[in-house]
Amino acid sequence: MKNTGKHLRKTAIMLFMSIALLLTMWACPLMDTIRGSGNIVAEVHDLSGFSAIKAGGASDVQVTLGDHWHVELITDDNLHEYVELSVENGALRIRNREMVNLRPTNKVLVRVVMPAIFEITGSGASTITIDSEIAQSDLSVRASGSSDVHLKVNLDKLTVSCSGSSDIYISGYSRFAKVSASGSSDFKGKAFTCDEAEVRLSGSSDMYAIIREEVSGNLSGSSDLHISGSPVIKVSTSGSSDIRKF
């Protein structure tokens, strides 16, 4: 019964988001719709000095850690001017120009090389993939809408906030992890290990992680915490939320 109820809640959330998408599409006549020409070209942008990524729209962002900065936009030649890339407050921002509805031949692709990354923010239908392992003291990850973030880490502290129907795909290790998930978002960390975790799950969100020592926090709605390991559990539950082993 619990799984059926959770499935219904997830379906309801997805239905709500579909209606929101339809309303957005209804509003599209008020925007300029620009279709891609089919001629895919790459353009290098002279941007540097950033240590964070903030991606929106329907962009696909591929990040590699290196000893320099490099930003390359790949999409239809007639759409380049409508994809805005800028550095603001130490973050590379990727977004579409306002009041423009882009219809690219393929998903807009942004390839990035940067020396270090300390904050990742995805929104809309963006996908952010970090090709290199992030090995440092701390990292903050935020995902909303239907965005996805893929990464491998080796950290002292990880802070994650995900909402909507966003997903975090993570592997590696962090000594401490603080995870907040709401809506139908998921933290997919079956290959992620931490010593201690603090969790706040609500809606129909799910979290998977290998936790060694202690996990604290609270679960509500029909959210589930799936853990491997034998940690001390100091987690309160309400609604039909549950703690499970995997």
Image (cartoon, rainbow, N blue to C red):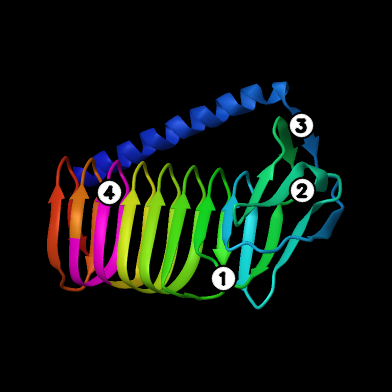
Q: Which residue is drawn at 74% across and 40% down?
A: 103
Dot 2, how many residues are within 10 Å of its Cα: few (below 14), some (14-19), or many (20+)?
some
Position in image of residue 178 (x %, y %): 31, 59
Q: Nearer the viewer, mark 2 or mark 4?
A: 4
In whole angstroms, how far apart are the C-alphas of marks 1 and 2? 31 Å
Apparent side of residue 65 relative to residue 2 in the rendered image (left or right): right
Dot 4, how many residues are within 10 Å of its Cα: few (below 14), some (14-19), or many (20+)?
many
CB within 8 Å, label 2 to label 4: no
Name the amino acid type tagged 3: Thr
Position in image of residue 211 (x %, y %): 24, 70
Identify the disc placed on residue 201.
4
In whole angstroms, how far apart are the C-alphas of marks 2 and 4? 37 Å
Position in image of residue 124 (x %, y %): 56, 43
Q: Residue at x 62, y 61 (%)?
A: 50
- The numbered mark, 4 or 1, whose residue comes first in the sequence reads 1
Identify the disc placed on residue 37.
none
Point out the image quarter for the C terminus: bottom left
What secondary structure is marked by label 1? loop
How many numbered markers are drawn? 4
What residue would you read off at disc 1? 116
* Residue 134 shows in the view: yes
Name the amino acid type tagged 2: Thr
What secondary structure is marked by label 2? loop
